[in-house]
Image (spheres, rainbow, N blue to C red):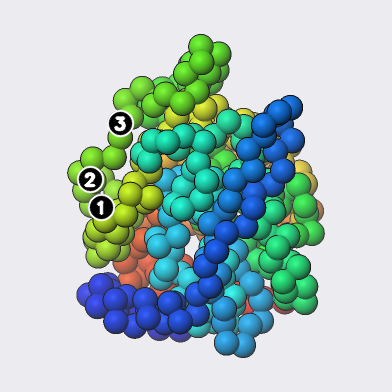
Amino acid sequence: MKIIQENEYLDTMKNEVEPYLKAHCREGYIPGAEDIYHEKNGIIGKIHVKRYLADDPKGVVVISHGFTEGAPKYEEMIYYFLQAGYHVYMPEHMGHGQSYRLTADPSLVHIDIWKRYVRDFLKVCHEIKRAYPKLPVNLLAHSMGGAIGVIAAAWEPTLFHKVILSSPMIKPLTGGVPWPLTVLIANAECLLGKEESYVLGQKPYDGTDTFQTSAGTSESKFARYNDLRKEKQFLQTCAPSYGWLKAAIKMSWYLRYHGWKKLRSPLLIFQAEKDDFISVRALQKFAAKIRKRGAAPCEYFYMPGTKHEIYCGGDETMEVYWDKIEKFLEEK
């Protein structure tokens, strides 16, 4: 398949990809999972889901996006999957995009308990399985969405036919603060009732993001999504609460000490060369344990010249990235 070239990216997305996606898109909401963690007045919000229908489908791909992201960031990848013959489901996690939120602050990503992410995501996946019982359901998951997606795969080992992890958040980096101190601070602030407060050093969205400090290597892709964020408030999530930090820590503990043992689907794991958001060492150890155990086939693929958001790379990166993904899905 021909990859959209960077020097034509903005024009091609506007004139070809966006009209194509619009014609193939159905948009709506799916109720989140039942809230079993609170005795009274549990919140059951609605998950915003975009579903894109291929003309002659051979499978389904569900995308689990990363921290602060929204559905439009994945439109290039969605286009490729459709062209390759896959239906695509693009749910936005709680606290992101147009899905329900537990805080009124549009800049803040907050969650009360980490299992809410996973249960909501599984609820969407069950809807997919009911809609297409004869099609294999595959997972593409990035960063925070990687943690959510892997836990979902661990909880229900037969759910996904194949699992693709792109810079998954097996363990988040903490800005130079030692991990034990981060754990202590997150727990202390939550005990003090500051779950919905910004993590120290974080601030509301102000529209001053720059390509130089972004997590991708394609300036045209950064520019497109950055313009969308300035235009749409629901894409302006940008900072974690202490509640989110505590949840990320607990997801990391679960994945590194328990979840990895339960995986059964074939995995393809991508690691970026330069990653400022997740621990590469933890990711490598995670993959090594899976491979040593042998219960799930696991291929680990290093991507030179990339940053955290590998799918926001230039021409050479995208050629390799997509080719690897397509071949992995096609393998028997």
Density class for disc 3 (Cα within 10 Å; few <14, some 14-19, many ≥20) is few
Density class for disc 1 (Cα within 10 Å; few <14, some 14-19, many ≥20) is some
C-alpha span from label 1 to label 3: 16 Å
Quarter of the image holding residue 134? bottom right
Image: 24 above or below 252: below
Residue 218 % position (x, y): 28, 62
Residue 72 % position (x, y): 40, 62
SS at mark 2 in the image: loop
C-alpha span from label 2 to label 3: 11 Å
SS at mark 3 in the image: loop
Q: Residue drawn at (30%, 35%), measured in percent from left and top? A: 204
Label 2 close to label 1 by CB (< 8 Å) = yes
**The C terminus is located in which quarter?**
bottom right
User: Going from the N terminus, do you reach mark 2 or mark 1 first?
Assistant: 2
Residue with the mark numbered 1:
230
Q: Residue drawn at (22%, 45%), measured in percent from left and top? A: 207
Image: 197 above or below 320: above
Quarter of the image holding residue 203? top left
Amino acid type for the residue under numbered disc 3: Lys
C-alpha span from label 2 to label 1: 6 Å
Question: Label for residue 203?
Answer: 3
Image: 154 above or below 40: below
SS at mark 1 in the image: helix
Image: 6 above or below 100: below
Residue with the mark numbered 2:
207
User: Going from the N terminus, do you reach mark 1 or mark 3 first?
Assistant: 3
| 301 or 313, nearer to the observer | 313
Residue 15 % position (x, y): 29, 81
The residue at the far bottom in this view is 56
Residue 121 % position (x, y): 64, 52
